[in-house]
Image: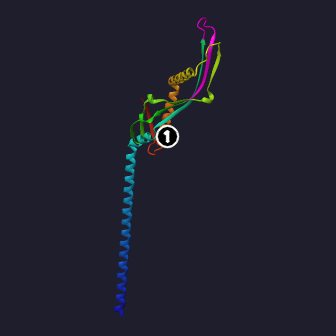
């Protein structure tokens, strides 16, 4: 009987020992799995970080975005043009034979083709950009018909008014005059340059990789 009891006790001890061993083994395996998962997670984070750093230093991303946008309109405005033209008599240069008044309003846009914007380099989330000022140009000019008018003046007997073809020439000349005058307005192009930098900064930061954009005018 005693021998039987001893065997039961020994069996229980052995079972308890194996249970502890199994528990320890399971705990060790669980820790190993957790370590491996952590290592895999760390590796994945490092990989993602390396990819992010590669993107941060790669100007191609910015160039692709500039190419996608194509052009940026940096400034919009209106320009009023007024001209009074009259024809005097040849003998006394005193009498007005015919006259015409041009009173036009033009809408214009100044901008830049982004293919000329140069991404110099990218360092530590800072982008260095060159802007050629001579590429900031008048992009469009349109006469506002509703706010523009042509007024015929008086004419003497047997003197023709301005023919439609003459009026067409005057209108074309007026438009060209406005183009030339806008082109000489330095303040307009300075404003356009400032606005262009602001729009480019928003565009580049909108990619999500960059914190600062530094511009250099060339």
**Is 10 above or below relative to 39?**
below
Q: Nearer the viewer, residue 96 or 52?
A: 96
Q: Residues within 10 Å of mark 1 (few under 14, many from 20)?
A: few
Residue 78: give x, y in percent of width and height.
58, 28
Q: Nearer the viewer, residue 124 or 213?
A: 213
State how many labels appear.
1
Highlighted range, magenta: 88-107
> At x 34% / y 82%, what residue is drawn?
14
**Is 46 above or below relative to 72?**
below
> At x 36% / y 75%, what residue is drawn?
22
Residue 2 part of the magenta segment: no
Q: Nearer the viewer, residue 104 or 183?
A: 104
**Is 68 above or below relative to 31?**
above
**Is 35 above or below relative to 209?**
below
Residue 169: give x, y in percent of width and height.
54, 21
The quarter of the rendered structure image containing the C terminus is top left
Residue 94 part of the magenta segment: yes
Residue 6: give x, y in percent of width and height.
35, 88
Residue 13: give x, y in percent of width and height.
36, 82
Q: Which residue is mark 1?
A: 202
Q: Nearer the viewer, residue 177 or 51?
A: 177
Identify the residue at the far top of this view: 91
In this image, 20 relative to 86: left or right? left
Q: How is the image coloured?
A: rainbow
Q: Secondary structure at mark 1?
A: helix
> At x 49% / y 40%, what residue is drawn?
202
The quarter of the rendered structure image containing the N terminus is bottom left
**Magenta segment, prevailing SS (helix, strand or loop):** strand
| Residue 65 location, quadrant | top left
Identify the residue at the far front of this view: 158
């Amino acid at each position: 009987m005693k021998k039987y009891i001893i065997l039961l006790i020994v069996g229980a001890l052995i079972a308890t020992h194996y249970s502890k061993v199994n528990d320890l083994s399971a705990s060790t395996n669980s820790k190993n799995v957790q370590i491996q998962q952590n290592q895999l997670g760390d590796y994945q984070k490092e990989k993602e970080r390396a990819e992010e750093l590669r993107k941060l230093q790669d100007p191609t991303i910015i160039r692709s975005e500039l190419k996608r946008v194509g052009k940026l309109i940096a400034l919009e405005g209106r320009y009023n043009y007024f001209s009074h033209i009259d024809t005097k008599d040849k003998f006394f240069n005193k009498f007005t034979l015919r006259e015409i008044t041009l009173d036009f309003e033009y809408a214009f846009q100044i901008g830049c083709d982004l293919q000329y914007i140069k991404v110099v380099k990218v360092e530590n989330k800072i982008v260095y950009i060159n802007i050629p000022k001579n590429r900031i140009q008048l992009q469009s000019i349109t006469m506002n018909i509703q706010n523009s008018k042509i007024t015929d003046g008086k004419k003497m007997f047997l003197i023709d008014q301005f023919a439609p073809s003459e009026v067409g020439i005057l209108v074309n000349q007026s438009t060209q005059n406005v183009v030339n005058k806008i082109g000489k307005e330095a303040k307009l192009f300075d404003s356009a340059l400032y606005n262009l930098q602001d729009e480019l900064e928003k565009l580049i930061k909108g990619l999500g990789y960059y914190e600062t954009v530094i511009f250099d005018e060339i």
